[in-house]
């Protein structure tokens, strides 16, 4: 009985370790994608400013690209953390 309990504890600890590692990998990947999106939007904004005819619409379009590209992932992360999105189905049943 003690041997089975020891095996179960080891198995559970291994599962928890894998879960933590996967969670960290997802967070790292999300940060990399967010950085990539922000960089691409800044690059696109620069291209709009340098290639399009200079007027108020060009400036507004470039500003919009930067705001959405840089602020979008940050706002999405804040909302996801504050409101626990995406919600786990098991968590919603408990409420």
Image (cartoon, rainbow, N blue to C red):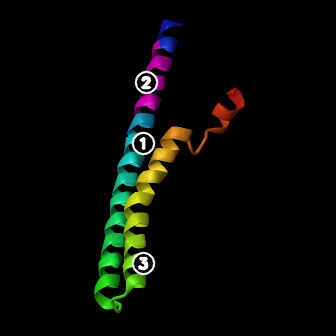
Q: Residue at x 35, y 90 (%)?
A: 52
Mark 1 neighbour density, 10 Å: few (under 14) some (14–19) many (20 or more): few
Residue occupied by mark 2: 13
Residue occupied by mark 1: 22
Q: CA distance from mark 2 to mark 3?
A: 51 Å
Mark 2 neighbour density, 10 Å: few (under 14) some (14–19) many (20 or more): few
Residue 7 within the segment the image draws in magenta:
yes
Position of residue 79 measured from the top left corner of the image (x, y, whole percent) = 51, 46
**Of marks 1 and 2, the one in the foreground:** 1
Q: Up-down: is 75 above or below 84?
A: below
Closer to the camera in the image, 92 or 72? 72
Residue 74 within the segment the image draws in magenta:
no
Question: Going by the image, does 43 lie left or right of 26?
Answer: left
User: What is the quadrant of the N terminus in the image?
Assistant: top right
Q: Residue furthest top?
A: 2
Residue occupied by mark 3: 61
Which of marks 3 and 1 precedes in the sequence?
Answer: 1
Q: Up-down: is 51 above or below 80?
A: below
Closer to the camera in the image, 9 or 73? 73
Q: Residue at x 43, y 83 (%)?
A: 57
Question: Going by the image, does 83 lie left or right of 37?
Answer: right
Main SS, magenta region, reads helix
The quadrant holding residue 40 is bottom left
User: What is the quadrant of the C terminus in the image?
Assistant: top right
Position of residue 10 measured from the top left corner of the image (x, y, whole percent) = 43, 21
Q: Residue furthest front?
A: 56
Which of marks 3 and 2 precedes in the sequence?
Answer: 2
**Which stretch did the figure color magenta?**
6-17
Position of residue 51 measured from the top left corner of the image (x, y, whole percent) = 31, 90
| Circle 1/circle 3 CB separation < 8 Å | no
């Amino acid at each position: 009985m003690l041997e089975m309990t020891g095996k179960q504890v080891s198995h559970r600890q291994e599962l928890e370790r894998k879960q933590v590692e996967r969670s960290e990998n997802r967070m790292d990947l999300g940060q990399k994608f967010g950085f990539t999106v922000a960089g691409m939007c800044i690059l696109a904004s620069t291209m709009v400013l340098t290639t399009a005819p200079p007027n108020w619409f060009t400036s507004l379009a470039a500003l919009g690209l930067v705001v959405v590209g840089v602020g979008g992932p940050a706002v999405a992360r804040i909302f996801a953390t504050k409101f626990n999105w995406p919600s786990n189905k098991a968590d919603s049943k408990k409420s």
